[in-house]
Image (cartoon, helix red, strand yellow):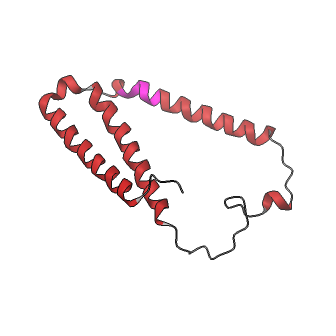
Amino acid sequence: MLAQYLPILIFMGLAAVLGLALFTLGWFAGPRRPDAQKNSPYECGFEAFEDSRMRFDVRYYLVAIIFIVFDLEIAFFFPWAVSLRSTGTFGLLSMLVFALVLVVALVYDYRKGALEWD
């Protein structure tokens, strides 16, 4: 049973070691010349002029919904397409319902104006 997971564990361990090695290499080899401008707070290219608890425009959240819709679509459609032969008609119908829910979310965003960039 554990032998089936050994390649995955080796891959994850190799990825962790490689990631830490590259991070450490960048930390030691990178330039460190801090100045007042580099240490200043950065938010969207200009200094903050209001309270951090200000209200966001609703379009920000609508764009987030669009991102989640397409992210979920990719995350679920690819494994579904790979296993379509084994899931059969039930898998097809369940993914059609899932796709319908995603389309409803996209239509909601469209009607709220999230796709209009003014």
Judged left or right of residue 97, residue 108 is right
Q: Quadrant of residue 3?
A: top left
Count of marks placed on residues: 0
Of residues 19 and 47, the one drawn nearer to the viewer in this rendering: 47
Q: Nearer the viewer, residue 22 or 50?
A: 50
In the rendered view, would you say 29 is above or below 10?
A: below
- On screen, 114 above or below 24? below
Rendered-image quadrant of the N terminus: top left
The correct choice, above or below, for 64 with respect to 2 in the image is below
In the drawing, does residue 73 fall left or right of residue 54?
left
Q: Quadrant of the C terminus?
A: bottom right
| Residue positioned 61% across, 31% down in the render | 18
Dominant SS type (magenta): helix
Provide residue 25's location: percent of width, then percent of height. Answer: 74, 36
Residue at the image point whose x is 80% and y is 41% from the top: 30
Asked whether 86 falls inside the magenta stretch, the response is no
Query: Which residue is drawn at the image coordinates 47% and 54% (left, top)?
Result: 116
x then y, percent, for residue 32: 84, 48
Residue found at x 79% / y 40%: 28
Q: Looking at this view, is 36 or 103 the one in front? A: 103
Would residue 80 appear left or right of 38 to someone viewing this image? left
**Span of residues in magenta:** 5-10
**Camera-nearest residue between 116 and 1:** 116
- Where is residue 34 drawn, in percent x and y? 84, 55
Quadrant in which residue 23 is drawn: top right
Rendering coords of residue 66 (x, y %)? 41, 50
